[in-house]
Every structure is written in structure tokens, then in C-alpha cells.
Image (cartoon, helix red, strand yellow):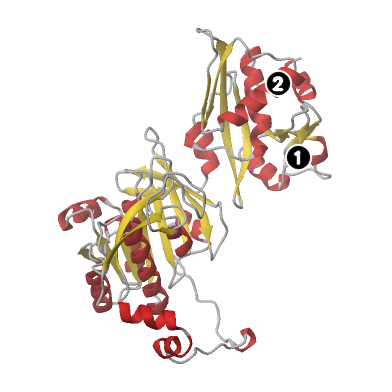
Amino acid sequence: MARIKTVYRCAECGAEHARWGGRCDACGEWNTLAEEIAVAAAVKRGNERRAGGRSASRAGGAAPATPRLREITGSETERWRTGLGEFDFVLGGGVVPGSMVLLGGEPGAGKSTLLLQVAARLQSGGHAALYVSGEESPLQVKLRAERLADAAGEVALLCETNLERILAAADAVRPRALVIDSIQTVFTGDLEGAPGNVGQVRECAARLMRYAKQSGTTVFVVGHVTKGGGIAGPKTLEHIVDTVLYFEGETGVDHRILRATKNRFGGVDEIGVFRMAQTGLVPVENPSELFLGDRHRTISGSAVTALLEGTRPVLIEVQALAAKAGFGTPQRVATGYDSRRLALLLAVLDKRAEMSFAALDVFLNVVGGVRLHEPGGDLAVTAALASSVFDRPVPSDAVFIGEVGLGGEVRPVSQMERRLLEAAKMGMTTAYLADRAVPRRQVAEIRTIGVSTLHALFAQLFI
């Protein structure tokens, strides 16, 4: 007979604790233990497991076969193309049958709209789709589907939160693609506890993953995010699935960025760009053109750099504004950029380039809601800051690519040729980069200028 027990489970690592504590003993994180009511295994079964040996062997049945890797036959399954080029690109070339994809993002980013479009595309391509909504009524889903350019009328719909009923419906419909919106609303009757708690999310995700592998159905799961931007629930949720996608987008812009942070069937850190329209999400084939479209070429404090997002080079604009501080302590405000990295570059400019910001407020913005994590954008940030201080614009057809060291030196970054080709395609004619990064042969129609230090760069730009 089963008995009820209460445990405390870590939301980060999933470790189980008998009592609550401020810190998880397994991973060392603070304030991550959440109370969970679970059904313990039957006492008789537990006694058999503790006995080990013969009892455990009888309980588990015959030992499974263990073939050699060279004896395994088969070929890679052909991917399904959805027709949404940016979505297929981020997944690594299309949807892998039998995989499980987790899509997270802020409320209102368009997660449900994107997956409804994917379901409609797969349905029209001959792959039956089942859309399970745990947050909206059938009429709400239908009204949203009618606004889309993609015809979603043939997609099967189920509004349910009980996992057993969802899997029973899936067994009856036999879809090739199953969309769960969202995992935080789904629960299993085998566990006591509200939907969304650590145990329910982990158990439901594990069963959906098992269903995907056994049936060959691709499962798409929507995940809510926390205030910190991570996917809500246990960290084991991201370990269970095959692919983790984040759908990012600022409130005031009409484009969204789809980013892969984990992909067992493709590259990570790939991005896809979509534009939010009345008829749904429209893929943007040339993100560089989108991010540079409204750029003012004659204004100071603006510089362009070429980032590498996964395997895709993207040109973005960095804007800086240095103004006289109105209060005692100068402000340091960065949007889309690490504030600690900004403080480091300001210190380098002060020490190595004799450019003091002690009495200036500094505001830095990466245009388009993009987050600049790569050190290859350091040179553009320093050029934009210096341009604002001198109040002189940098050349409008120039791109700045390089990492800035603590000594004020300019260091090379990887895959320079691909960045330069993208810059040339967008009409740039000059590239400032590290001396050692200057290619031996000319790339496209772009002139490369090597600089060794920030002093050398500023001497060419402003003197």
C-alpha cells in the first residue's frame, strides 16, 4: 500500500531533502528548496529493493541486451521542414522526429503563436499535429489561429491539464507532433501536489520524453520563465529535453529573437529573427538589415560591429552617450550589455587612453534589443564612447571588430573572414581590427585597417 510523504526538492539540481534548509547540500544554491508532496513507493516493493540480489533481479525481470556499437544498424532520420526558415535554421535544419523541444520566454513574447504556426505548417505538410492548451479555452485558441496567415484549422485541439488524459488522447489521435502549452499547467494524478511544482514538472517532462522516444512523436513544450530569465521549475527539466530554445523580445520592438542554448541535433547559440505582424510571426532572412535599418549615419556616439551568433554573423549598432553628470555620483547605465564589462572598458579608457569619465554619466545601448555578450564588440563600444566624448561621428561605412585588453591593446577574434563578408554585404567599406587579425588577402570589397592599441585607433578616427 502506498503512503504519502513530504520532501523538499532543490529547484536547481533536483536533490531531495528530508527537511527544509536555506541552502541545498548538493549544489550549494540558496533558497531553492521547495516543499513537495509525493507518493512513496509501496513498502513491499521498497523492501525488495533493499534486499537486493535475487529479489531485485526478480522485480526488474531479465537483463536487457547490450549490443556492440558496431552491431547497431540504421540511418539518420530525415528532418521535417516547417517552412519557417529561421525556426528550421535554429533547430539545425528542421524538426527531428521523436525529439523533445522546450521553448521558454517572457509572457507575451509569442511562444504560443510560434508553436501554433509550427503545428499548422507540419499539419499542412502531412505530419498530423495535436495542440494541447492548458491555459486557454478552445474558442481563444481558435480566435488566435484565425488571425494567422498559416491555416491552422486542421490542427487537432485538446484543452486539458491531466497528463494521463493527454497521453490517452495522443494514443488515440497518433499525432506526429504534440504541442504542450505549457508544462507548468500539466499534472499527473500519481503525485500529490499542485501543477507547476518541482516534482510535477520533472515527472511530467520525463513521461513526455519517454512518450516521444517510444512513439517517434516530436513533442514541443512551452515553459514559463522566472524573474531572472531562466525557465521556471527544476533545472533537470532542461537536462531531460533534447533542445532548449529561448524566445526573446523587448516590449517596444516588433521583432523577436529565437536562441538555442542546448541542441543535441545541431549547434548551440544559433539565433533566428522573427518580426511580429498581425498575421503572426514572419521570419527575417537578413537580421543585419533589420538592426541597421534606422541608423543615423551622421550622429556621434554610434559604431557598428559584427557579432557571431552561433554560425551566423550579424551586424549591430552600439550607441553611447557621455554627458556631464547632474548629480554627485555619475551614472553607468547599460542596455543589452554587461554593466561590469562596461566598467572595465571605462577604466581601460581612463588609464590607457587618458579619457576620463569620472564626471560624466555614461549610457550604452545595443540597438534592437540584442544582447552583446561577445568580446568582439569591445572595439565598437570604445569607439562609440570616444565618439560621444569628442562629439565627432565615426565613419558611417566603418565596422569595428576586436577585443580590448586591460593594457589597452586590441586583440583578434575568431572567424574574421565571415564577419568581414557580412560587413561587405551590408555596404561597409572599412573595417578596423587588430593588427594580427588583418587577412593576408582582401576580403570582398572591404578595406581592413589594423590597429594595435586604442591610442592608434583614436589617432586615426579623431586626430
**Tag shown at residue 412:** 1
Looking at marks 1 and 2 on the same chain, the residue that comes earlier in the sequence is marked by: 2
Vertical placement of 352 versus 181: above or below?
above
Q: Nearer the viewer, mark 1 or mark 2?
A: 2
Q: For residue 170, what is the image quadrant?
A: bottom left
Tell me the quadrant of the picture where the C terminus can be found: top right
Vertical placement of 248 versus 2: above or below?
above
User: In this orientation, which residue lies closer to the viewer: 82 or 18?
Assistant: 18
Residue 457 in the image: x percent, y percent?
76, 24
Q: Could you classify mark 2 by the number of other residues whose Cα lies within 10 Å: few (under 14), some (14-19), or many (20 or more)?
A: many
Residue 6 in the image: x percent, y percent?
30, 60
Vertical placement of 36 versus 54: above or below?
above
Q: Can the viewer see residue 83 in this picture?
A: no
Q: Amino acid at mark 2?
A: Leu
Residue 153 in the image: x percent, y percent?
23, 62
Measuring 84% from the left and 44% from the top, which residue is drawn there?
Answer: 440
Horizontally, residue 432 falls left or right of residue 112, namely right
Horizontally, residue 138 falls left or right of residue 419, namely left
Q: How many marks?
A: 2
Query: Circle 2 is placed at which residue position?
Result: 349
User: In this orientation, which residue lies closer to the viewer: 222 or 36?
Assistant: 36
Measuring 31% from the left and 72% from the top, which residue is drawn there?
Answer: 128
Q: Amino acid at mark 1?
A: Pro
Q: CA distance from mark 1 to mark 2?
A: 19 Å
Query: SS of the residue at dot 1?
Result: loop
